[in-house]
Amino acid sequence: MIPYRKEPVFITAEQCPQAGRERMTLPQPVANYSAEGYTDPEPAMLEHMRKTGAVFMMGQNPKLPVMPKKPTLLDFFHYRFCDIAFRHLLQSAKHAMDAGCNETVIMACLLHDISNGAFLRTDHGYWGAQMVAPYVSEEVSWAIKYHQALRYFADEPAGFKYPEAYLQFFGPGYEPPEYIQQAYREARNHKWYMTSRLITIHDIYSFRDDIEVDPDIFTDLIGRHWKQPAEGLGFDNSPVAHIWRTMIWPNNFL
Ligand SMILES: [Fe+2]
Ligand SMILES: [Fe+2]
């Protein structure tokens, strides 16, 4: 476990819903597409269900940490985000803080890859912006959406070169699709361009596994820039509550 991550709390299979039954977890359909094409594990699992009385998992997975009843933003960092996302978001925000950026930029850095944490990588800027929109300023959400496109386009006067990592991830000469190019053109002429550009600038330095950042240093900033719902994320009936619930119970069959 990496430093500053809170100790996870688990419950036993007997304390979970459907106790006493074998509970099967079916991957989400989007995870069934791969370099090999489409594979669908569902028919074999249905067969197993008919033969053995196993059921599909609903509710708490005993292998995942239990979330508090009214989860906060940092609860998702501690109990759901993968280690890479946990470190990367905290390092990115700390890097922006140390560079003297304003709080809007620091907040945007803290949240910019939130979708990669425990939800979806594909179009992560768009998903991330949507997930946080009810809880942050319009500027923060806008900057998160557009950072995805801006990462593909250098702005050397502002201090951003095309990422070395992208040469490795996608190969030299990779061209982003038209909708990303269009998003870049839109962002370039927008009043909040630099907010999003600063995400990409502090992003690039923040994939180290030898720097640990304590999330608690952002508690006051989050208090000022994040509208935490009293019911907890996932239970406030906001237009995106279902996304947060999906991260709490990612194995629900339906
Ligand atoms: Fe990103
Ligand atoms: Fe990032």
Image (cartoon, rainbow, N blue to C red):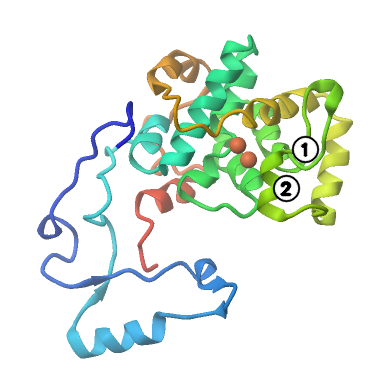
Give the image location of residue 215, x and y in percent.
Answer: 41, 23
Q: Residue at x 37, y 68 (%)?
A: 253
- At label 2, counting other C-alpha atoms closer than 10 Å, the crowd grade (few under 14, some 14-19, many 20 or more) is few
Distance in Å between CA atoms under marks 2 and 1: 8 Å
Name the secondary structure under disc 1.
loop
The image quarter in which residue 9 lies: top left
Give the label on residue 162, or none. Answer: 1
The residue identified by callout 2 is: 167
What residue type is disc 2 on? Leu
Q: Amino acid at mark 1?
A: Tyr
Q: Is mark 2 in CB contact (under 8 Å) with mark 1?
A: yes
User: Which one is in front, 66 or 199?
Assistant: 199
Q: Secondary structure at mark 2?
A: helix
User: Which image quarter holds the N terminus?
Assistant: top left
For the C terminus, the image quarter is: bottom left
47 vs 43, left or right, is: left
Q: Is residue 152 above or below residue 222?
A: below
Question: Which quadrant does ligand 2 occupy?
Answer: top right
Mark 2 vs 1, N-terminal side? 1
Label 2 CB, ligand 2: below 8 Å? no
Residue at image point 50% right, 67% down: 31
Percent coordinates x, y for residue 221 in the rendering: 50, 15
Is 141 situated above or below 198?
A: below
**Image check: 22 left or right of 202?**
left
Give the residue at x 72% y 24%. Answer: 195
- Where does the image place residue 154, in percent across and percent down from the top left? 82, 34
- In terms of depth relative to the viewer, which is nearer, 133 or 220? 220
